[in-house]
Image: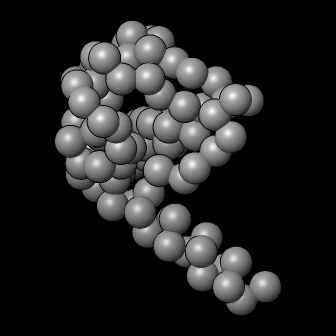
Amino acid sequence: DKPMNQEYDVQLSFEELVHACDNDRQWVVSLIEENAISISGEPHLATFSGYQLARVRRARRLHRDFDASAAAAALILELLDELEELRKLNN
């Protein structure tokens, strides 16, 4: 995931992240397994950033709006990241 200034970033527990994502624990775990967000260690012990929360919420919208699986949502997020990088290079 993109580095952020940890001092000013929000820090969420796994339970807080799950609560912010429609209380769907398996969905969050699936996204972690698909590397949509990266963590070290076990999900239930990890701390999550605001950036990771935004990615999980975006993936959840992809699931809701387009019935995207966790694997498809992770791929779409990766492609969107690459597109953003290419746009930065062209500016």
**Residue at figure coordinates x 64%, y 24% from the top left:** 10
**Residue at figure coordinates x 38%, y 44% from the top left:** 37
Please name whichever residue, 42 or 52, is drawn nearer the observer in this view of the structure.
42
Which of the 4 image quarters holds residue 18? top left
**Vertical position of residue 3 compared to residue 20: above or below:** below
Left or right relative to 71: residue 87: right
**Residue 8 place in picture, x, y as percent:** 73, 29
**Residue 34 place in picture, x, y as percent:** 24, 48
Please name whichever residue, 68 or 78, is drawn nearer the observer in this view of the structure.
78
**Residue at figure coordinates x 51%, y 18% from the top left:** 12
Please name whichever residue, 34 or 40, is drawn nearer the observer in this view of the structure.
40
**Residue 60 place in picture, x, y as percent:** 43, 36
**Vertical position of residue 65 compared to residue 24: above or below:** below
**Vertical position of residue 89 compared to residue 73: above or below:** below
Residue projecting furthest to the right: 91
**Residue 13 place in picture, x, y as percent:** 44, 15
The C terminus: image quadrant = bottom right
**Vertical position of residue 7 compared to residue 65: above or below:** above
Left or right relative to 20: residue 6: right
